[in-house]
């Protein structure tokens, strides 16, 4: 799709158990995000496909409510619910083991807008100077869920909601490397979720602010991106360990409904000896 990342796969029915899954997986690892026009998956088919990539995740909110089986996250925007995902991020970095993959299926396309954008976190690392790469590889970052909690409080109007206390108690701040090593490809990538990053641990407050501002501008470089204009029934699958994404907030007040399945990952790590 672009020089940075993304590919559309045609002629493969992902509902078919005999489809070339190994080929799809290889394309995904190479291109970091792949797309299928009008896959038209039911929720059950969506979950079945997800299981071919690993163990479907139970999102923290349903888990706190007692659910133990994998759940779909349905994201709905409309006149009374503006898009909250229009910033570059990797999903759920406030947990110790963020997802490895995500599968997104468009249910209701808005009348205008509603595209999703992806950024290659590997290209974002590769395009930095060697000196900046070396500097960032020595840093660790604290991530927490306070931004997520603030949005929950705004939505419910209740700062003492049991889920607020549950999130803080069960998902305390975690520390991840600023640069992660991909466990399958060995490539290095920025681990970036600005709304969940609280600070870079090794820097002063002033240094922290400056480096975060620089990286925020860096991942905004269009040469690192691809963009998908949805049709209802489209499917996107991406590697959470190699990409960032954001949903363009350009469709309000039109309704947009999208369904997501995430696949369990492992703790991010940086291996100074591993680099392709």
Image (tube, rainbow, N blue to C red):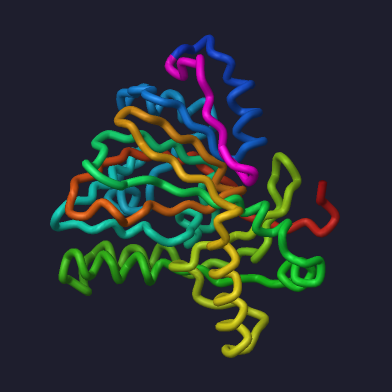
Q: Is residue 17 above or below residue 161?
A: above
Q: Is residue 9 magenta?
A: yes
Span colored in magenta? 1-15
- The answer to whether any part of residue 70 appears in the image is no
Residue that appears at 58% across and 24% down: 24
Is residue 202 rendered to the left or right of residue 56? right
Q: Is residue 234 above or below residue 166?
A: above
Find residue 250 and report its horizontal and vertical position in percent. Answer: 30, 55
Q: Quadrant of residue 151?
A: bottom left
Find residue 91 and report its horizontal and vertical position in percent. Answer: 46, 53
Find residue 125 and report its horizontal and vertical position in percent. Answer: 69, 59
Q: Is residue 43 magenta?
A: no
Q: Is residue 258 above or below residue 78?
A: above
Q: Between residues 142 and 224, which one lies in front from this camera angle?
A: 224
Residue that appears at 27% across and 34% down: 107
Find residue 142 and report its horizontal and vertical position in percent. Answer: 55, 72
Is residue 188 rendered to the left or right of residue 7? right
Q: Is residue 56 above or below residue 75?
A: above
Is residue 60 rendered to the left or right of residue 237? left
Magenta: main secondary structure: loop
Residue that appears at 64% across and 43% down: 3
Q: Between residues 201 and 192, which one lies in front from this camera angle?
A: 192
């Amino acid at each position: 799709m672009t020089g940075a990342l993304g590919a559309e796969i045609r002629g493969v029915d992902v509902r078919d158990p005999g489809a070339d899954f190994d080929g799809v997986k290889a394309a995904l690892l190479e291109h970091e995000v792949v797309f299928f026009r009008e896959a038209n998956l039911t929720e059950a088919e969506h979950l079945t496909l997800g299981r071919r990539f690993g163990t479907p995740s139970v999102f923290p909110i349903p888990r706190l409510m007692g659910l133990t089986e994998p759940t779909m996250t349905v994201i709905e925007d409309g006149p009374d619910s503006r898009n909250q995902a229009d910033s570059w991020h990797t999903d759920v970095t406030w947990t110790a083991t963020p997802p490895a993959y995500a599968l997104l299926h468009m249910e209701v396309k808005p009348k205008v807008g509603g595209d999703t954008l992806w950024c290659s976190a590997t290209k974002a690392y590769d395009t930095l100077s060697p000196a900046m790469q070396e500097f960032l590889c020595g840093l660790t970052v604290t991530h927490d869920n306070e931004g997520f909690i603030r949005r929950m409080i705004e939505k419910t109007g209740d700062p003492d909601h049991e889920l607020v206390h549950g999130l803080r108690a069960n998902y305390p701040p975690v520390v991840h490397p600023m640069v992660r090593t991909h466990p399958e490809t060995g490539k290095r990538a920025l681990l970036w979720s600005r709304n969940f990053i609280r600070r870079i641990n090794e820097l002063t407050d002033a240094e922290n602010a400056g480096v975060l501002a620089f990286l925020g501008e860096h991942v905004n470089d269009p040469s690192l991106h691809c963009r998908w204009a949805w049709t209802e029934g489209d499917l996107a699958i991406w590697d959470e360990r190699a990409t960032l994404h954001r949903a363009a907030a350009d469709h309000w007040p039109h309704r947009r409904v999208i369904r997501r399945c995430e696949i369990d990952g492992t703790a991010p790590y940086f291996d100074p000896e591993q680099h392709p």
